[in-house]
Image (tube, coloured by chain):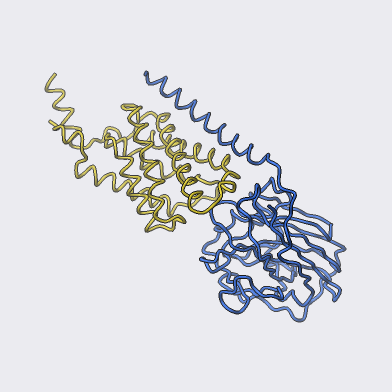
Chain colours: A blue, B yellow
Amino acid sequence: MQFKYKLAAALAAFALLIVAVWAVQWAYLNREASSDSGNYILDETFATQDLIYGPQAWVPYASKMPIVPGGDVDGDDDFYVMFVDLNATSNLNSTFPRVQVKYSFTGLNGMAAFHVYGYIQENSGLSWTNRVDGDGASGYYVTSNPQAVSTLAGAQAMEGINNIFVQVANHAGAAFNGYGNDTYFMKFSKVGGGLNSLHITTDPRVPTGQVTNTGNVTGTFFVNFTGDRVQDDFILLVAVNGQIGSDFQLNLKSSVPD
Amino acid sequence: MRTLKQKKYFLVYEVAFVSLMAALVYVFKTFFRTPIQLPGHTAIFWVIPFIIGIGLTRKFGAGTYIGVLSGLLIGFVGMADTGPFKVFEYTAMGLTMDVLALAFRGHLTNPLVGFVLGAFGSFSKMIVNYSITSALSVNANILLVGIGIAGASHLIFGGAGGIIAGIILNRISHFQFPNHIENEKSSKNRK
């Protein structure tokens, strides 16, 4: 075969491959998601005293990562933070593997931000989280009746940004209690790493997630992972600012849809 | 004049050269970072040593050798998630490039041929990676989420690296191994 025909055939195969991979992805993402949300694995109400960390404008990572997109990590966004063990991970046999989170706030007078961390038992730490800023960012932010920032007396600053133990607020403690003190270890190896596989989404058919800002104090979102790092457990970070009174409560329910 | 053995098998300095290319693949893969958030985009760097290795030695198997050696380095010395299984990915990539180089023999200095080698080599690596990952741990469901972006970026960035390799090869193709020079001299003498 002449050189030019070989080259033309190879370039045609190149174009065909690009079309084929997009067609496979399109076919995959256009399937129906299961409407069965599964049984609740977590159904617990958290209160003011569970917000044990803060005030701060960042979430733990290899370096300070803002709680809200574009936020100043050293700014005065005085969020108080708690960690909630969802006791669940995606069912890999479902059409769109994910964990469903239902939330219900009372007494929210400011913003609440949700972020997710991933735990792999053999890694013995939290080394994955959702990207807050830039391409591929996802997150869930609830704003209701914003009022002036209050100070929580019982909260304390985190020991550091990374390589720290964080306490979960669950009454039953940590599902993977490898250290025996109901904590998880933040273990990010480098800046930029561990930000691509975990996502927060409101649509199962968009597994890579999106940034959602809402005023609904009750609602549902999903956390999931993509890629080849199979997570054993998801831990939710909840950060709240504004006026946090004694009436503040957050009910969280997690389940694994089929 | 080159003997049949010299034409068929790798000579010591050719082995040394392709080993250096394999080491370069390891360096590119492990230490080069870019701000682009796309899977497979680093192929733009590490297809270059593959194609230059194949182009200068002009022997079938050079790509496979580079693949095996770089896969071993990345799998065992690097920080690869799938560890030793990396060797299969890079071997598949090298083998694909070897076969394509055979099909386009004598035209490897053409950047478009470099594009074809780079794109298909990088894509074959991705396919083997997906096969190993789904066989080892993950339901194929999750892998298919981003296969459109991952596949396209492997093809495009691999192809872009191939174009660079083709241009480099074009500029350094006058550099020849001693056995190639001897062979050319003997061909002229025969005429």
Is B74 positioned to the left or the right of B151 in the image?
left
Would residue B122 be seen by someone viewing this image from the given angle?
Answer: yes
Q: Residue at x 19, y 45 (%)?
A: B12
Q: Residue at x 67, y 68 (%)?
A: A85
Is A151 positioned to the left or the right of A188 in the image?
right
Q: Residue at x 39, y 45 (%)?
A: B90
Task: Report the quarter where the N terminus of chain A lies.
Answer: top left
Where is residue A225 drawn, in percent x and y? 61, 54
Residue A75, located in which quarter of the rendered image?
A: bottom right
Where is residue B106 drawn, in percent x and y? 31, 26
Q: Residue at x 17, y 36 (%)?
A: B6
Is B14 positioned to the left or the right of A47 in the image?
left
Q: Please tell me which residue lies in front, B22 or A222.
A: A222
Residue A242, located in which quarter of the rendered image?
A: bottom right
Where is residue B79 drawn, in percent x and y? 43, 58
Give the answer, above or below, for where B151 lies relative to A13.
Answer: below
